[in-house]
Amino acid sequence: IGLQEVEMGGGSVAMGTVKDNLFRGMQERGNDNARFWYNRISDFLPSNAWTRIGLRQMSGLLLLVYARNEIQGSIGEVSTASVACGVLGVGGNKGAVAVAFTLFRRRVTCICSHFAAHQANIEARNNNYVSIARHLKFTRKQLLETQSESTKPDDQEEGEDGNDSADSDAETHSEMGDLDAQGSGVRDTEFLVWMGDFNYRINGIARTDIIDKSRRGDLRDLVVADQLRQEQERGRIFHHLKEGKIIFHPTYKFDRANRDPFAYDTSEKLRVPAYTDRIFFRGSVSESLQEQHQQHESDVCPVVESGWLEVQKGHPQLRQKLCRPLACLGPLCPFRPSGTGICTEQEADARAAELTSAEEMPRLAADDIRVACPPECYNALFEVVDSDHKPVWALLHADVPVADQSHLRGLASTLLSRGDAALQPAPACLRLSTQQVQLQVGNRQGQLQISNVGESAASFEVTQRPAEGGSCSRDSGLPVWLHACPVSGILQPQASTVVTFSAALQDSRYVSQALVADLRIAASNLYQSGLAAALGASPADSHLQVMYVPG
């Protein structure tokens, strides 16, 4: 639930800026106005059906996120953030608040925005989008990043409070279509819902004509002239995002307390009606890009008419779970029968069944999150008269692939416990040029060539065999009379190296008998050594004898 202008005035903006920069925790609790809305909504929603999982306020902006109790246990890592785009680029009267969390270990982000006002301020609104898409980031202290942060200068690390104030960005708006140009808050999410009063207006149609077309239900020309749709088609805003098909007349601006659904502003300003209040969404980016190529000329701009997902195939109860909670919304339930004001569970199920007749969305990658807004699931509540805007609602259906974590852990445990052959690392394969190196009085040095004839990089180490007695040098593990160089190293596949042995004797006249060192060349697969240790595998050993024969 996203709200704008829950409070107004310069004092509110100033106080909100201070809180956002110094006391982020207060913005997650909300002030008196935010708590008023939270308490009223919480009283309206039965506690046995819904639980609030996140709240974020910034001046007049407020975002509340609720979850059905049946999935609450699968939600975690909740965090909030905000981006200010208002007065002097830091005021919270314009900008965005956001709540992020994981659902079945998939990252979900909800954003509520309020963009710059007035008919001609298209560029200012576009800049608001760019600032939010670029600067929205969440605090690592509360939300573990699902992907590593970019190290580019454009993508600096976020502050401790998860809040970046941003002025107008000078970069080209089309560059934001590249995910690398977006901030981590938007880029890394796998399921994004972006709602708000975006303040885009209708171009080129007179106020009286807009009202007349609205009364007749002739909406096509109004949607075609919508500034937001035009800017999105030009690739400047809301990249990879979709919107349900608009089947309702403009939601701005109305006379308060007037129940006429076409009671547009009659003040001296006579503001022109517009589609200022919208809800956009996307699933996985690949899913969003695929649907961009599925628009038909019969559609009004890039609208989505995709049907429900495969929720009814093999899971008929899932359809009921999706719609039944809406019955508790009473007079605000979008599926209520006309004139009754109340929607029962049976009526909600029946209405949902009608919507499942549309074609399913195209199949995508197995792990893609797919999101659809079925026909008639995107509308406005024109009977609400407490505001000069009409609330807009959307019922989105998300297909979220879920990995059975307990099954994966059990499988991994089984494989590790039995040392499955498929996981056993390929042994290192080293070849020695000789099995014996002999040193003499006149020639105290000898050489050994070690070659890696395997397919993976391998490490080697020259040490004394454990069964050999006598003292060893502390550094190399060799007898005190023997030096080797190098005593260890790494060999790439098909590479070789030469180890030089030398007798470290100050006076060989006192050596009366041959000195023998039994050595081992310990080899292990470099890239699988960790797994080998976990499975109890031991390094591959080769044996070598080095002998010094006195004169």
Image: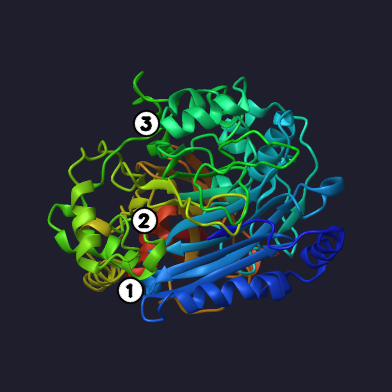
- Amino acid found under the numbered disc labelled 1: Glu
Q: CA distance from mark 2 to mark 3?
A: 29 Å
Instruction: Give the residue number, with chain letter if any, for mark 3.
Output: 290
Q: Are marks 2 and 3 in contact (CB under 8 Å)?
A: no
User: Which numbered disc, 3 or 1, marks the residue that appears first in the sequence?
Assistant: 1
Q: Quadrant of residue 346?
A: bottom left
Residue tagged by mark 2? 334
Q: Amino acid at mark 2?
A: Pro
Image spot of residue 9 (x, y percent): 82, 59
Say what secondary structure mark 2 lies in: loop
10 Å crowding of disc 1: few (<14), some (14-19), many (20+)? few
Please determine whether, in this image, residue 340 is positioned above or below residue 272.
below
Evaluate if marks 3 and 1 touch, with contact meaning CB atoms under 8 Å apart.
Answer: no
Position of residue 342 measured from the top left corner of the image (x, y, whole percent): 32, 66
Residue 474 is left or right of residue 345, and the answer is: right
According to the image, label 1 marks what residue? 70
Nearest the eye: 502 or 57: 57
